[in-house]
Image: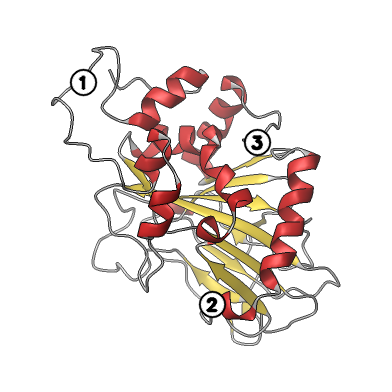
Amino acid sequence: MPTGGNRDRAVLAVALESLKKDGFARLDNHLDPGQLSTLSAEASRLFKQPDILSDRHPAGWLEIDKPLELSALYRQLLMDPVPCSAAVALLGPDIELANGGELDQKVPETPTSSCGWHSDFIWMGYLPRPRPFFWLSAYYFIEDVDVDSGPVWVMPGSHRWEAEPQDGDDPASGGRVLTGSEALTGKAGTLYLMNNEIWHMSPPNRSKRPRVIFKMHFKPGWTKWHGKGREPSKKLREMEAEPPVQQLLAVFDHDDVPWQHGENVKMSRYPVVNWLRSQGLLLRSYE
């Protein structure tokens, strides 16, 4: 479990207000140096295995689908209460992961490692913005990310816009840096939480260092998983027995309890809620 300094209700409350207003929140020093070192070494090990690399991104942008299945070290982040607390506060108690996690690396000095401006539900153009639901993404910086290494750029507050941004893409290098946009940069160990409806883009990594990020995406339980086989697999579900993790991996049957409560009337039917309450990090009451 992460042992950084962010397991504090006051810090989380500030992050939650930033998520509501701006669509993202930054938590510095979230991973302690020891855990960060092991996760960095583990990422290096995984990226040396070409057979597990996805082909979804352009050249120079490496991605590993379902690292939660491939690495016990990354599976430990499933028990990080901080993003779960924010997800429950914003999405409600019925949360699950949208996939088995993502581990991506932008290779140094790769002009093709970019993508243009978009929101992750841009394909849902038939539903007017601002849409009434979203996913919450957790981005863990495994290496330092600065403006030269291809960070995510966001338009603060754009998750609340009614109109789509116009003229944001640059055919030569993904997205332009638009007036008012902000780069998500920080030291290794930083955690960013981001509403996936915020408009964002990612320019190429022009630095001499790799950009390595681990991502988890939290969704309302009733929405679909990511496609193309990226959903948590049966193998992954069978690896974890903790009730809150089983909920995140869609093992827990929410209807397999009395309608309103669990066996104890003070308990929620949602294991994640009971767990967060025990950690003192339940930011909203669902009793």
Q: CA distance from mark 3 to mark 2?
A: 27 Å
**Label 3: which secondary element:** loop
Mark 1 burial class by Cα count in 10 Å: few <14, some 14-19, many 20+: some
Residue 239 percent across, percent down from the top left:
45, 49
Residue type at mark 1: give it: His
Residue 55 percent across, percent down from the top left:
53, 82
Q: Is residue 169 visible?
A: no
Q: Quadrant of the C terminus?
A: top left
User: Residue 91, located in which quarter of the rendered image?
Assistant: top left
Residue 269 percent across, percent down from the top left:
26, 27
Q: Is residue 33 above or below residue 116?
A: above
**Label 1: which secondary element:** loop
The residue where tag 3 is placed is 2
Which numbered disc, 1 or 3, marks the residue that appears first in the sequence? 3
Q: Residue at x 47, y 38 (%)?
A: 20
Q: CA distance from mark 2 to mark 1?
A: 42 Å
Mark 3 burial class by Cα count in 10 Å: few <14, some 14-19, many 20+: some
Residue 103 percent across, percent down from the top left:
60, 63
Q: Is residue 159 visible?
A: yes
Between 53 and 203, the residue placed more toward the observer is: 53
Q: Residue at x 56, y 21 (%)?
A: 9
Mark 2 burial class by Cα count in 10 Å: few <14, some 14-19, many 20+: some
Q: Which mark is residue 261?
A: 1
Q: Which mark is residue 100?
A: none
**Label 2: which secondary element:** loop
Residue type at mark 3: give it: Pro
Q: Residue at x 25, y 62 (%)?
A: 127
The residue where tag 2 is placed is 54
User: Residue 229, located in which quarter of the rendered image?
Assistant: bottom left
Q: Is residue 25 left or right of residue 219?
A: right
